[in-house]
Amino acid sequence: MAPGPSPAPSAGIVLRPLTGAAFRFDPGALCLELLVTGGPGEFRRWESLHGPAGLVAWAAGSRLSPAPVPEVTDAEAGAARRVRDALWRLVHARLAGEAPPREAVAEINAAAAAPPLVPAIGPDGERVWAPPVTGGALLSTVARDAIALLTGPHLGRLRVCEGERCHLVFVDTSRAGRRRWCSMERCGNLHKVRALRARRERDA
């Protein structure tokens, strides 16, 4: 079960790396799904939140159910990048055992203070999002999920993939707590291939 308030479980999001085949990655929390859109420093090269359309596209592929179609302004798209970068800093500070950066904390708290997405029952009896469905409401929902993760019982299950040159972050929600890879389709399989080659070379 996701540590944050994500309303429905997800089988993960499909990532398409520059090299290799597409694979499915389940970070275990809504807020961590946002991290695949880019980030500060070296992660800037993966930027996909270039404007409102980028945030709308991310929402469509997120674990939120039903997928919201928010009306996003340029200012909200910029806020999404700031929230994501703040979350990157908070997550990596936690993984390094460091104190959370104050500016990053303030950014997340400010986003969470806005009204979030509100679920409702639609005319056909299905789940919908009550209007207004805005970029700000989407970011508030993400920020609240981040707070639930970073202050909740799953914090100790925060992991970074052990794959070579892989920086994907996830919450290990497995019962045994032994998840090592972003995906067995990608880094887990690559590890098996490298280990097999190493054994063959050693035994040759």
Image (tube, helix red, strand yellow):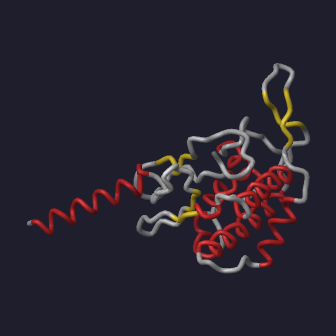
Quarter that holds the C terminus: bottom left
- The image shows residue 122, relative to residue 55, as above or below, that is above
Residue drawn at (26%, 62%) of the image: 195
Quarter that holds the N terminus: top right
Quarter of the rendering containing residue 12? top right
Residue drawn at (78%, 58%) of the image: 143
Left or right: 83 with respect to 185?
right
Residue drawn at (85%, 26%) of the image: 122
Left or right: 156 with respect to 134?
left
The answer to whether residue 32 shows anywhere in this view is yes
Residue drawn at (90%, 59%) of the image: 113
- The image shows residue 82, relative to residue 11, as above or below, that is below
In the rendered image, residue 172, in percent from the top left (x then y), is placed at 55, 55
Furthest residue toward top: 124
Left or right: 184 with respect to 85?
left
Quarter of the rendering containing residue 131? top right
In the rendered image, residue 80, in percent from the top left (x then y), is placed at 77, 60
Quarter of the rendering containing residue 10? top right
- The image shows residue 202, relative to residue 27, as above or below, that is below
The answer to whether residue 48 shows anywhere in this view is no
Q: Nearer the viewer, residue 86 or 7?
A: 7
Q: Nearer the viewer, residue 121 or 97?
A: 97
Q: Nearer the viewer, residue 162 or 75?
A: 162
- The image shows residue 116, relative to residue 93, as above or below, that is above
Count of marks overlaid on the render: 0
In the rendered image, residue 7, in percent from the top left (x then y), is placed at 73, 40
In the rendered image, residue 159, in percent from the top left (x then y), is placed at 55, 64
